[in-house]
Image: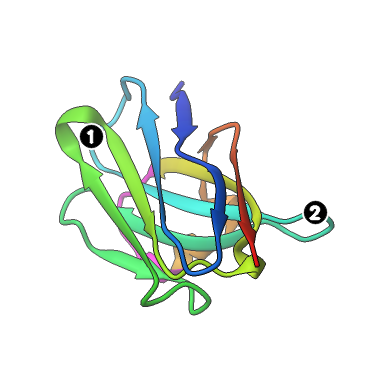
Amino acid sequence: QVQLVESGGGLVQAGGSLRLSCAASERTFSNYAMGWFRQAPGKEREFLAVIRWSDGNTYYADSVKGRFTISRDNAKNTVYLQMNSLKPEDTAVYYCAATRYAGGLIMSMTSTQRWDYWGQGTQVTVSS
């Protein structure tokens, strides 16, 4: 069982930046992926970004491409989401996720069903 803990959410003005962190507990596998999703009230959980641990390969949703950056720290079992140029429509609860990643297209990780472990979420609110 992998436990994930998000941090770094809060209130920020439009155009500002936040960095989210997600720390994972000890895992039973070495090859895995970690990613970020968000969910606004009344909406489905939305894929944002994924990073493959083995080589650092990344994939982003079009809605955040060029504004958000996912990165990893192998020694800390931690993934980050640097969010720049934030917009009010970015307001949501942000979740980190983790799963085994044996292979396949990284873009397949956009589905919530591909992920085994989820954090509790952290609120991000972007004001006008």
Q: Residue at x 78, y 61 (%)?
A: 43
Indicate the amino acid at tag 1: Ser
Part of the protein shown in magenta: 100-107
Give the dominant element type of the magenta stretch: helix, strand or loop: loop
Q: Amino acid at mark 2?
A: Pro
**Seen in the image, is 114 located left or right of residue 107?**
right
Q: Secondary structure at mark 2?
A: loop
Residue at the image position 30 percent from the left and 50 percent from the top: 102
- What label does residue 30 carry, if any? 1
Q: Is residue 43 above or below residue 15?
A: above
Q: Residues within 10 Å of mark 2 (few under 14, many from 20)?
A: few
Image coords of residue 48 (percent x, y)? 49, 63
Picture quarter containing residue 40? Answer: bottom right
Q: Picture coordinates of residue 47 (x, y %)?
A: 55, 62
Secondary-structure class at tag 1: loop
63 is higher (above) or lower (below) than 27: below
Whether residue 22 is visible, yes or no, is yes
In the image, what residue occupies the spot 65% across and 58% down? 91
Numbered tag placed on residue 38 in the rendering: none
> In x, y percent, where is residue 44?
74, 59
The residue indicated by pointer 2 is 41
- Residue 91 counted in the magenta span: no
